[in-house]
Image (cartoon, rainbow, N blue to C red):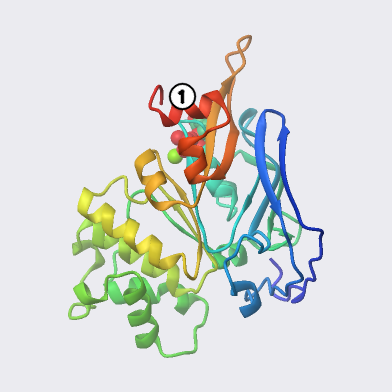
Amino acid sequence: MKEQAPDTQAMNSPVASSEATSGGTRVYAQEVAPPVTLSVAGVSEEGRATGSPAEPPVFSVRNLSVYYGKNLALKDVNMDIRPRRITAIIGPSGCGKSTLIRCFNRMNELIPGARVEGEVLYHGENIYAPGVDPVVVRRHIGMVFQRPNPFPKSIYENVAFGARINGYKGDMDELVERSLRRAALWDEVKNQLKKSALDLSGGQQQRLCIARAIAVEPDVILMDEPASALDPIATTRIEDLMQELKQDYSIVIVTHNMQQAARVSDETAFLYTEVDEATSARWGILVEFGPTSRIFTKPLDKRTEDYVSGRFG
Ligand SMILES: Nc1ncnc2c1ncn2[C@@H]1O[C@H](COP(=O)(O)OP(=O)(O)O)[C@@H](O)[C@H]1O
Ligand SMILES: [Mg+2]
C-alpha cells in the first residue's frame, strides 16, 4: 500500500451475478459495482456507506497459491470478500486455513521459505505489488491470533502501543477508552488500566488484543481461531463482539468450529485437502464459497456436504 494511494478509483462495471465453476471451485460472483469512490489509505465514507452486496469487494483474491519451500500448501484460490461482513474460513485441520488468512495482510512472508503467487487486491490494489510496504498493509488489516498474545505491559499500554508507534497525535486516554469500549472490555478494566495485561483472564486478554487491533483504526480484522483457547462464556462474548464490530469493519475468521461459523458468519469458504496419490503430496483448495446459510443447508459440492454434516474432519 502506498501511503499516497490514488484516492479515487472509479469502478464501473455492468451488473452481473454469475455462477462459475473453475477448476472444481464454485465461485459465486456478484459483480455489481456501482460507481464508488474509495480511498485506499483511509477508506472514505462513501466506501463505508451501505454494506449492501452491491458494494465492491474489500479483497479480491486472484489465482492465489502458497508454497512453503517446495511444498504447495494452497492452490489457486479465487474469492471476493465483502465489506462489513463476517467471512468464515472452515475446513479440516491442515487444509490451509491459516495459510490463506495470513495472505490477507502478508503475514506469510514472516515465515522463512514461504512464497505467495497470484494477487490479493485490497480495494483494487494488489498488496503483493512491488513497492507496497507490508507494514502499511498491516496497519489497514489487523490480526488477532488463536492464543491471546498481550504484551507484558499494562492494559493501557497494550492498547496505546500501535498508536504510539504510528506517532498518534490525538488524545491517547480517549483512544484507549474508545478502543476498550468497542472491544466490550472497558467496564471490566476501567479502574485497573495500569494493571498488567497478563493478569487478565484468557477471554479478557483476547478482547484486549481486539482492542489493540482496533486502536490503530484498521479497515479489516483477521481472526485465526480467536476463541479456540477460550471457555464457552468467553467464546460467546467474542462472537457477540464480532456482530458489533462488523458494522464498521470487514472481518475474516478462521474457525474449526462449524457451529461457530454458522452462528457468526455471513459468508463461508470451505477449504479441503487434495492429495496426489502418486507422490502423496497434499495441498489445500477452496472447494466452495458462498452465503453461510446456503453452504450449510444446500452445499453444491459433495465434499462440502460431507464436511458440514460432520462425516469427516
Ligand atoms: N510455517 C510453516 N512451514 C511449513 N509448512 C507449513 C507452515 N505452516 C503451515 N504449513 C503447512 O501448510 C499446510 C496448511 O497448514 P495451515 O495453513 O496451518 O492449515 P490449517 O490452518 O487449515 O490447519 C499444512 O500442510 C502445514 O503443514
Ligand atoms: Mg490453522
Write the residue at 39% across / 77% down.
160
Q: SS for tag 1?
A: helix
**Rendering coords of residue 233 (x, y %):** 21, 54
The foreground one among 25 and 256 is 25
Can you say which quadrant of the picture contains the N terminus? bottom right
**Rendering coords of residue 101 (x, y %):** 53, 47
Local crowd at mark 1 within 10 Å, few (<14), some, or many (≥20)? few
**Rendering coords of residue 149 (x, y %):** 34, 57
Can you say which quadrant of the picture contains the C terminus? top left
Direction from residue 201 to residue 180 in the image, left or right? right
Q: Is residue 107 above or below residue 175?
A: above
The image quarter in which residue 240 lies: bottom left
The image quarter in which residue 301 lies: top right
Residue 103 visible here: yes
Q: Which amino acid type is marked by label 1?
A: Asp
Write the residue at 46% across / 24% down.
306
Residue at mark 1: 306
**Rendering coords of residue 103 (x, y %):** 59, 48
Write the residue at 63% across / 29% down.
72
Q: Quadrant of ligand 2?
A: top left
Counting labels gives: 1
Q: Is mark 1 within 8 Å of ligand 1?
A: no
Residue 231 visible here: no
The foreground one among 203 and 158 is 203
Direction from residue 270 to residue 124 in the image, left or right? right
The foreground one among 171 and 265 is 265
